Amino acid sequence: MNLTFPTDYESIRQRIESIDPDQYGRTRNYVDGAVTYLSPYISRGVISTKQVLQSVLAKGYSLRSVEPLVKELCWRDYFQRVAQVKDVSLAIKQEQQPVFNHDLPSSVLTAKTGIVGLDKAIEELYTTGYMHNHCRMYIASVVCNIAKSHWSGPARWMYYHLLDGDWASNACSWQWVAGANSNKKYYANQENINKHTHTHQTNTFLDTTYEALEQMITPPNSLRETAGVAYSTELHSGKLLELQSDLPTFIYNYHNLDPMWHRGEKGNRVLLLEPAFFEAYPVSKKCIEFIFALAKNIPNLQIYVGSFDSLALNAINTYYKEHPLNQGYRGLEEPRDWIVKEVEGYYPSFFVYWKNIQSYLPR
């Protein structure tokens, strides 16, 4: 599959318009299913979950008929709500048990697990910056529940490479698989993987029952060797900023590249890339190149590599969008475009969150 992610805003809007909710509902669990491929744009704040939902409903679909798609969009909002309240880098409900190491199995790192569907998905991640959601769950299950690796390090490996890397969604999902954010660990056997990746393998370490997988104490030989990986982000300073002090300053960052935000208003527009943030949450060169390409949709956007404080801005005239990972920002914080803004705070499960937002959803 020749998977690409266009970065001009019109192509992104066309991708929204091309969503087929019926096909999505029927095929989304398959690697070649009719998924939207919109997650990189949502994670980078180019578009919102609400914008996608409104576009689909404007075509006359009822909420019930597109519920699988709506739930997936709401999952993204839910994870962000969790991260507003919890430090998702720590265990949300309970510690993962048992844990044999805090690294990544070398065979996962090199895409040589012997599970063809998973190895292809890892290779695609390295090549395109994307991985199908089910494959993310399969790999997390193998890493955490078969190899008994702690979820945090492997989650950072995946986040590093994903164009749609969203720390809240990524960390919460890995914790859910590993049983740190759920009441039961998630397992996938070879039959499940074969079905959804269109492979036909047998006699692998996953070719057994779910009961046998849950009782597996010792990791198979192919998962025993582990590797610790150090990640870093390449940031290159742009030109010196030219700011007009009599105009407002709009701060964009890794989570907000919305070209429609305050569009048409006069102001200084700055893409802030803080070294401290990328040291804590490093991403690949491919991810940085992606945001630079997306930034071209925002006229007169200047790139600044440094801390928020070093900008020395007047807080009264500085605007930014809320995000859990914004640290030390000062100014006028504006909310993101939530599907349901009225439902805030922490809910212990998506099921509880979904029950609370349903009455607010358009019918």
Image: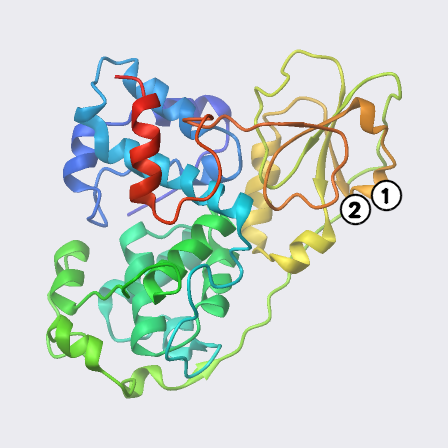
Viewer-proximal residue among 215 and 106: 215
The C terminus lies in quadrant: top left
As drawn, 226 above or below 163: below
- Disc 1, SS: helix
Report the disc number at residue 296.
Answer: none
Residue 239 visible in the picture: yes
Residue placed under numbered mark 1 in the picture: 310
Instruction: Tell me the residue at 56%/56% (across/down).
Output: 284
Q: Could you tell me the amino acid type at mark 1? A: Ser
Residue 307: mark: 2
Q: Quadrant of residue 342?
A: top left
Front in this rendered view, residue 84 or 264:
84
Tell me which amino acid carries mark 2. Answer: Ser
Q: In the picture, residue 98 is in which quadrant?
A: bottom left
Q: Is residue 294 left or right of residue 196?
A: right
The crowd level at tag 1 (other Cα within 10 Å; few <14, some 14-19, many 20+) is few
Residues tagged 1 and 2 counted as in contact (Cβ below 8 A): yes
**Height in image: 212 above or below 257?**
below
Can you give x and y, in whole percent of width and height, for residue 37 in the image? 35, 38
Helix, strand or loop at disc 2?
A: loop
Q: Residue at x 28, y 66 (%)?
A: 185
On the image, the x and y values in percent for residue 62 come to 20, 18
